[in-house]
Image: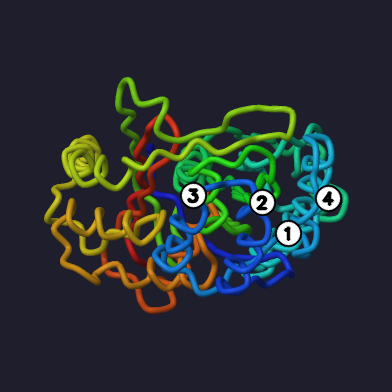
Amino acid sequence: MASPVGLLSLATASPPHELPQKDALAAARILFAGRFAQFERMAPVFDAVGIRTRQMAMPLEWYFEPHDWAERNAAYVEAATALYEAVAHRALDEAGLTGGDIDILVTVSTSGIATPSLEARCAGALGFRTDVWRIPVFGLGCAGGVTGLALAARLAAAEPGARALAVCLELCSVSFRLEHPSKADIVATALFGDGAAACVLQAGEGGFARIVSGAEHTWPDTLDIMGWRVDPQGLGVIFAQSIPAFARKNFRPAMEQMLARQGVAFDDVDRFLCHPGGTKVIEALETALDLGQGALDHERAVLSEHGNMSAPTALYVLDRARWAGLPRRSVLTALGPGFTATTATLLAA
């Protein structure tokens, strides 16, 4: 990154339908017990993932109905457009700016397809200029929040004074399916929720933190760990059971390599802010990074209150950490399809 980029604001927004985890389990038992012979054996995962409640794009009764891909994607586009507008407004208001002040739009979402993309659909309501740069990004999954933030920072740094709005939005729940459920589908139903986060960035000083660098690491021959499969019902989750074990074994060396490319020593990091993929993933990251059990407290709190929202979840962790008080140097990090680790290194203002 050519120069530091100020993080002027950070906003989050959740869809309106609250789903306590006990209600999610009760609904899953009705939906899956007759379709998946091993459901009761897997039911304890609803307690094990560390979620108390989460927010969903659609009312609970919607999930009891069969939906093809067209219906699921229509629900995604409608709900995502409204959520994009809400979270972008909040980020702009905190920064004291309007949509017309933004030069670059980075939109990250992997849970549905919108063409025209979400920022184009919201351009009139948010007052974006006709010459704004639009960069919609698909396929990053849980890594999208960190990568999207780092990408927006790189683009803003390339032009002094430029302002970027990065929005990460996922509606994972629209992919929940009744048809031919697998173990991964049961885990996804127990784990994932919906949400959005938005940041305004500006090249130079200012804001509550500066993004000074970022890096990624993609492991070879790991395409089957996480992603989507496509079928007539839409996007079905690929979610390997091996993720915690993989992170425990491989994350520390990758993190050291990413930090070294940024000129940062591992021991110079005051706080790792991690995407909370689930309780087992959090525990694996604490072990891999030698943090001590319970160190990732913001991560556990976000997971408990919102579930794993995929891309925006790491930014929810950052938001919680900034109000608690960021240390001098923190590293925001996530794992996602590829299989990839991604980082953004921040210095507190």
Q: Earlier in the sequence, mark 4 or mark 2?
A: 4
Q: Earlier in the sequence, mark 2 or mark 3?
A: 3
Disc 3 to disc 4, C-alpha distance? 35 Å
Image quadrant in which the N terminus is located: top left
Q: Residue type at mark 4: give it.
A: Glu
Q: Mark 3 touching mark 1, by CB under 8 A?
A: no
Q: In this view of the protein, can residue 213 be seen by the observer?
A: yes
What's the mark number on residue 38?
3
Q: Residue at x 45, y 47 (%)?
A: 146
> Mark 4 Cα within 10 Å, few/some/many (few <14, many 20+)?
few
Q: Residue type at mark 1: give it.
A: Ala
Mark 1 lies on a secondary structure that is loop
Q: Position of residue 18 (x, y in %)?
A: 67, 72
Depth-wise, is mark 3 or mark 1 nearer the camera? Answer: 3
Mark 3 lies on a secondary structure that is loop
- The residue at which mark 2 appears reads as 171
> Mark 2 Cα within 10 Å, few/some/many (few <14, many 20+)?
many
Q: Mark 2 touching mark 1, by CB under 8 A?
A: yes
What's the mark number on residue 78?
4
Disc 4 to disc 2, C-alpha distance? 11 Å
Which sits in the foreground, 347 or 170? 170
- The residue at which mark 1 appears reads as 57
